[in-house]
Image: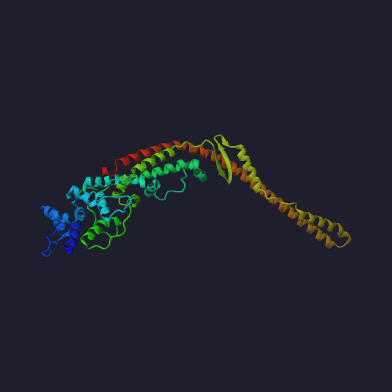
């Protein structure tokens, strides 16, 4: 019986045609639901009346019989032959507090791919809607599932020359909100784009290289007929939905998960649109060369700029003591020259050398002072130029904000349209 059931599943997965007749050795086992369930499946596929074996199988285990028939018909591409009541019996009840059963996940997958037609997809959607799943997970979890790996900071074109200004909260918030809203719109458009659905869509039985969700129907069917290994761990309802939303997930499952997350996405999109439209500040304090400069529409604030310039001067000039060493060398040299006529000419030569060394030290000190002055002058000039440039960048950011708000409104409107269409539209 088990060998025939396994061969039957393989045959259905291959072409979905009427299976070969059961072998002579195939017989009913009193109290066991599988033999009459297999008979009912063969009768359905052959166009015969399945009522008698179906009644026997249901009287022995109604839920397993319904689950077996629903999945087997989905695998064969003939899910439209299921009775409306079978899906409800096979699926059972979902719960936020309990893991999703493997059978439920398999039916979920089959319905998402259109194996049972629009009615099957709507059945799963109603099951999920009844639980208000979106209220049991933080909104940020849904957003991170949809668009993981967000940038730490978004630098708008107006601030390309002043990326540190893009980190200021007053400027960062609208830019980050607009970027997140645009990414959400793109991801929702990707999920709701054309998907392969329809009554002829098959649920793949076995493909080791694909996502594990695609192997779920096979694992459940083999477990039902007693030829499969132990079932793997089950995940929570919220975990499945979050996984279904991540990039690279099955687009059919993503469509259903997006429908569940739609109420949260509406609220988040409205907040992002509002943040994207925030008016840019007229005045702002920004860090320039490590100094805080207050920017006004007409230019940098003179008081803060003067304070910054004074700080540059203070930090740029190295305090130096009097050149006592050079002075002493010069005095010693003069003394040697004065005493040379009374002693030896060599003393005069030593005096000249000593005076020269002292003069060289004084010249070196002067060069250092001039270098300090040039450095400070350059820093002050650069500070002024950057402060003026930051004011113009702030003006450009203000002009850019109008286009950003307009684009955010368009993105929000399109996102609302996409999630309003939902998976039923496909």
* Residue 216 left/right relative to 136: left
For residue 266, side relative to residue 398 (left or right): left
Q: Provide residue 87's location: percent of width, then percent of height.
A: 21, 50
The image quadrant that residue 353 belongs to is bottom right
In the image, taking residue 418 as reference, residue 90 lies left or right, namely left
Residue lying at 83% horizontally and 55% vertically, measured from the top left: 334
Whether residue 115 appears in this view of the structure is: no
Residue 47 at x, y = what percent?
A: 11, 52
Front residue of this view, candidates 368 and 236: 236
Q: Residue at x 32, y 39 (%)?
A: 417
For the C terminus, the image quarter is top left
268 relative to 233, above or below: above
Q: Please, is residue 340 above or below residue 188 in the view?
A: below
Quadrant of image for the N terminus: bottom left
Seen from the viewer's position, the closer of residues 73 and 206 is 73
Write the residue at 27% across / 62% down.
230
**x and y percent of residue 302 in the render?**
61, 37
Residue 304, x across and y down, in percent: 61, 39
Which quadrant of the figure has residue 193? Answer: top left
User: Quick check: 384 left or right of 246?
Assistant: right
Task: Tell which of 128 and 163 is nearer to you.
Answer: 128
């Amino acid at each position: 019986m088990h060998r025939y059931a396994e061969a039957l599943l393989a045959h259905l997965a291959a072409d979905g045609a009427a299976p070969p007749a059961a072998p002579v050795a195939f017989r009913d086992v009193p109290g066991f639901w599988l033999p009459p369930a297999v008979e009912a499946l063969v009768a359905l596929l052959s166009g015969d009346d399945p009522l008698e074996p179906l009644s026997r199988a249901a009287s022995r285990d109604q839920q397993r019989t319904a689950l077996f028939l629903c999945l087997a018909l989905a695998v064969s591409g003939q899910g439209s032959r299921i009775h409306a009541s079978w899906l409800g019996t096979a699926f059972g009840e979902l719960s936020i507090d309990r893991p999703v059963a493997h059978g439920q996940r398999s039916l979920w997958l089959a319905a998402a791919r259109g194996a049972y037609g629009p009615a099957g997809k709507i059945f799963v959607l109603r099951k999920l809607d009844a639980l208000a799943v979106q209220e049991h997970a933080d909104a940020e979890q849904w957003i991170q599932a949809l668009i993981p790996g967000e940038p730490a900071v978004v630098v708008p074109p107006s601030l390309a020359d002043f990326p540190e200004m893009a980190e200021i909260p007053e400027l960062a918030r609208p830019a980050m909100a607009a970027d997140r809203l645009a990414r959400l719109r793109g991801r929702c458009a990707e999920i709701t784009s054309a998907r392969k659905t329809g009554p002829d869509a098959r649920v793949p039985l076995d493909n080791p290289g694909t996502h594990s969700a695609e192997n779920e129907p096979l694992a459940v069917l083999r477990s039902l007929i007693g030829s499969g290994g132990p079932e793997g761990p089950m995940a929570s309802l919220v975990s499945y939905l979050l996984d279904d939303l991540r990039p690279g997930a099955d687009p059919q499952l993503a469509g259903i998960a997006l429908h569940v997350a739609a109420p949260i996405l509406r609220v988040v999109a409205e907040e992002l649109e509002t943040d994207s439209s925030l008016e840019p500040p007229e005045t702002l304090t920004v860090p320039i060369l490590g100094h805080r400069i207050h920017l006004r529409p007409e230019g940098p604030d003179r008081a803060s700029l003067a304070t910054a310039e004074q700080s540059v001067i203070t930090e740029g000039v190295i305090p130096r003591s009097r050149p006592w060493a050079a002075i002493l060398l010069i005095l010693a040299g003069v003394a040697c020259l004065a005493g040379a006529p009374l002693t030896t000419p060599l003393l005069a030569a030593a005096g000249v050398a000593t005076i020269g060394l002292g003069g060289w030290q004084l010249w070196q000190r002067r060069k250092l002072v001039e270098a300090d002055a040039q450095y400070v002058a350059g820093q002050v000039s650069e500070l002024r130029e950057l402060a003026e440039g930051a004011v113009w960048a702030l003006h450009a950011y203000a002009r850019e904000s109008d286009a950003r708000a307009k684009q955010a409104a368009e993105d929000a409107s399109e996102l609302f349209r996409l999630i309003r269409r939902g998976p039923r539209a496909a």
